[in-house]
Image (cartoon, helix red, strand yellow):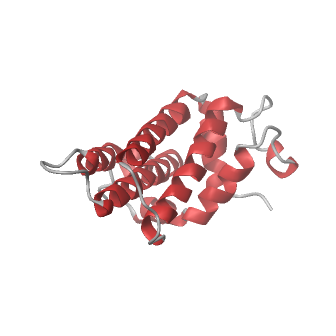
């Protein structure tokens, strides 16, 4: 299975916000750029979860696809809402590192929520008027989110991915 490469989605977003020969970028391009950024982060985390649970070398298996496709937008959003809180809710505490999820996971979670809201507006709000700076900020936020996730300790990343795949009841 060829997973979607987050870098390619970021590159697409950057091309869409590049100034055209005349005038500002079209609204449709700014909207698609913001959407591409959210999907870059979304597919990044899907890949991270499936790579961790099934393995990078098993990307062509049905089990990998099952794990990859298991995560939906609401599940990711719901977990991110809980992870960005200053105190981890009780139902998650026993599955997190003793020192909590840390500022990098919190920053990642906050960015996911922000980008998902921006994507919803860009994709579904016909009254939204976007500026190039909105799309450029989204690109920076998305790239920063992935860097923050990668800077988190391995135990925190693995805890986040496990909670994403197996939410506690």
Which residue, as the protein is rendered here, is positioned at the far front? 23
Looking at the image, which residue sits at the far left? 21
Is residue 60 in sight in this rendering? no
Q: Nearer the viewer, residue 20 or 123?
A: 20
Q: What quarter of the picture does the N terminus occupy?
A: bottom left
Residue at 70%, 52% in the rendered image = 81
Q: Vertical placement of 49 versus 155: above or below?
A: below
User: Which corner quadrant of the image does residue 62 belong to?
Assistant: bottom left
Q: In this view, does 75 lie above or below 25?
A: below
Which residue is at a point 34% across and 60% down the rendered structure image?
32
Horizontal placement of 87 versus 112: left or right?
right
In this image, 78 relative to 69: left or right? right
Q: Position of residue 24 (x, y in %)?
A: 25, 51
Compared with 144, 78 (above or below) is: below
In x, y percent, where is residue 147? 48, 32
The residue located at (51%, 56%) in the rendering is: 118
x and y percentages locating residue 33 in the rendered image: 34, 54
């Amino acid at each position: 299975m060829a997973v979607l490469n987050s870098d390619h989605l970021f590159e697409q977003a950057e091309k869409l916000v590049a100034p055209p020969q005349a005038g500002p970028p079209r609204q449709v391009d700014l909207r698609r750029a913001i959407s591409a950024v959210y999907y870059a982060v979304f597919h990044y985390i899907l890949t991270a979860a499936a790579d961790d649970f099934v393995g990078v070398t098993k990307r062509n298996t049905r089990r990998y696809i099952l794990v990859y496709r298991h995560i939906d937008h609401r599940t990711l959003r719901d977990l991110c809402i809980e992870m960005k809180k200053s105190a981890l809710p009780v139902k998650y505490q026993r599955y997190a590192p003793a020192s909590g999820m840390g500022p990098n996971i919190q920053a990642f979670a906050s960015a996911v929520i922000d980008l998902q809201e921006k994507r919803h507006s860009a994709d579904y709000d016909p009254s939204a008027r976007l500026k190039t700076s909105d799309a450029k900020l989204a690109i920076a936020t998305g790239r920063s989110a992935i860097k923050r996730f990668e800077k988190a300790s391995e135990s925190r990343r693995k805890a986040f991915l496990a909670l994403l795949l197996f939410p506690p009841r």
